[in-house]
Amino acid sequence: MKQQYGQILTSPKPFVKWAGGKRQLIPILNENLPETFGTYFEPFLGGGALLFHMLTERNGQKCSISDLNSDLVLSYTTIRDRVESLISSLKNHEKNYQKDSKFYYYSIRESNPRSQIEKTSRLIFLNRTCFNGLYRVNSKGKFNVPLGKYSNPNIVNEDNLRSVSNVLQSSKTSIKCRDFEAVLRDAKQGDLVYFDPPYQPVSNTANFTGYTNKSFTCDDLSRLADLCTDLDSKGCNVLLSNSNSKEVTDMFSSKPWKVNKIKANRSINSNSKKRTGHFELLIKNY
């Protein structure tokens, strides 16, 4: 597609690495989309892999995306509205990082910038340089991941940032910061709602619910299951990704839910041997 930059840009891809990111599962998710639907809703936006696929493949698709992580939502709006200023700020991070990566990383991790540009460039910089690209905050909401071992991290991916900016500007996409339940007010019959929440842990060590400082609890999972039932009764198409756990299977064991087990690698595991051979669930009502 031709853009306002006078060049053909690459297809937009996620600009952050996020726990549970869906890039590797796009072919399977694509196969499982309804043939036709109205507005596309994604209330746990994260890295947005399916969103970017949708905006690339379906010209003019109306989308409503949201997340409870306000820094992440700010990043999407900053890239949409002020991408050139953001790229300049990231280039500055890159230059300083190359001088003394350890000192610079921890000084930025401790910083608390106020401006929209600096907040977003801090998030992207830390995501590109931290251990395993894992976005995690502690109970006080502070980012607490150590420095990663990278010889040459891709801090400023200009082409992709401009491509993301362009597709968000040119599409009918609204971006909000809100709890996932708010989708019930907006979604109508025939719309598609895709839920990709922080997964239920399948073991004591596999807990990735720390991407906002309010963890996604079993109560939240129950709220989500009830919400899916309410959306189903409104005539919405509902698609849900989650871990292959007993709690999730039990909650979606009756009609109208169809539960498929799909193979998925987990890119965020400190032991690379444990990143393969996992299954997760894809649940839908159509």
Image (tube, grey):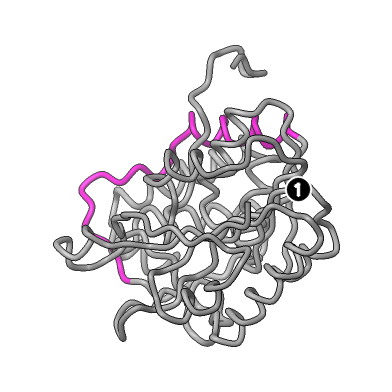
Estimate the x, y position of residue 220 in percent, counting from the top left: 61, 81
Residue 165 drawn above or below residue 124: above
* Residues in magenta, as a range: 146-171
Residue at the image point whose x is 69% and y is 58% from the top: 66
* Frontmost residue, 9 versus 27: 27
- As drawn, is 81 to the left or to the right of 19? right
The correct choice, above or below, for 210 with respect to 15 in the image is below
What residue is at 70 percent from the left and 46 percent from the top?
40
Q: Is residue 136 left or right of residue 39?
A: left
Q: State the residue lying farthest toward the left.
A: 273
- Viewer-proximal residue, 22 or 29? 29
The N terminus - image quarter = top right
Badge 1, how many Cα within 10 Å: few under 14, some, many 20+?
many
Residue assigned mark 1: 191
Q: Position of residue 188 (x, y in %)?
A: 83, 53
Q: Is residue 201 positioned above or below 30 on the image?
A: below
Indicate the position of residue 256 as horizontal and vertical percent values.
Answer: 63, 63
| Farthest-out residue, front | 255
Q: In which quarter of the image is residue 112?
A: bottom right
Hey, which quadrant is residue 182 in on the image?
A: bottom right
The amino acid type of the residue labelled 1 equals: Asp
Foreground pick, 105 / 38: 38
Q: How many marks?
A: 1
Residue 262: x, y in percent?
36, 55
Label 1 sits on a secondary structure element that is: loop
For residue 281: magenta? no
Q: Is residue 86 above or below residue 264?
A: above
Magenta span contains residue 149: yes
Q: Where, by quadrant of the figure, is residue 212 drawn?
A: bottom right
